[in-house]
Amino acid sequence: MHYKSTWNKSKQHEHTKDYSKGKIYIIRCECDDYLLYIGSTCQTLAQRMGQHRKVMNLKNKQHFKLYEAMHVHGKDKFYIELLEDYKCERSEQLLKREGELIREYKAKLNQKKAGR
């Protein structure tokens, strides 16, 4: 007898992340110093920026402030920088720090304030 797995892939991915590689990044627009987005990841910054550039064209994501700005100004005008390495053990810790920096930088392109 075969059983279909009910394990959610995103939950599985969550448990396999290496939070010791956590980092907080900022995405800036070279044409407007006030267009800032702050995020967190355990990936390389190149991988994460590649994901943002890919996802910006999905219909269900195009309304996000970051992706709207990328469409208006051109995705090649946006670049990613490391704000800080943030080694931790759980996603909640990484998101909390992300939220602190969103508020500190007053990042206009963040929809939600992480870590609330």
Image (cartoon, rainbow, N blue to C red):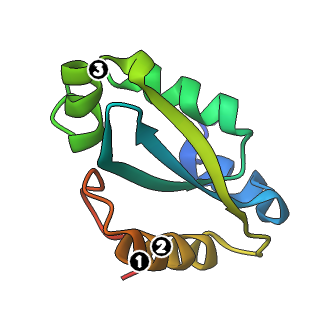
Mark 2–mark 3 distance (CA, rounded to whole Å): 27 Å
Residue 91: x and y in percent read: 61, 69
Residue at image location 73% in from the left, 69% down from the top: 86
Q: Where in the figure is residue 48, as x and y percent of width and height?
A: 60, 35
Q: Quadrant of residue 60?
A: top left
Which one is in front, 4 or 49? Answer: 49
Judging depth in this view, the residue of 15 and 30 nearest the camera is 30
Q: Earlier in the sequence, mark 2 or mark 3?
A: 3
Q: Quick one: 34 or 110, which is closer to the camera?
A: 34
- Marks 2 and 1: in contact by CB < 8 Å? yes
Number of numbered discs overlaid on the protein picture: 3
Q: Which residue is mark 2?
A: 101
Tell me the CA gap for discs 1 and 2.
Answer: 5 Å
Residue in the image at 66% along x and 47% along y? 13
Of marks 2 and 3, the one in the foreground: 2
Looking at the rendered structure, the kind of residue marked 3 is: Leu
* Lateral position of residue 60 relative to residue 46, left or right: left
The answer to whether residue 8 of the structure is visible from this angle is: no
In this rendering, the label closer to the viewer, 3 or 1: 1
Which circle marks residue 58 in the picture?
A: 3
Q: Is residue 73 left or right of residue 55?
A: left
Rendered position, 24 above or below 3: below
Q: Which residue is mark 1?
A: 104
**Apparent side of residue 63 relative to residue 77 in the rendered image (left or right):** left
Mark 3 or 1, nearer chain start: 3
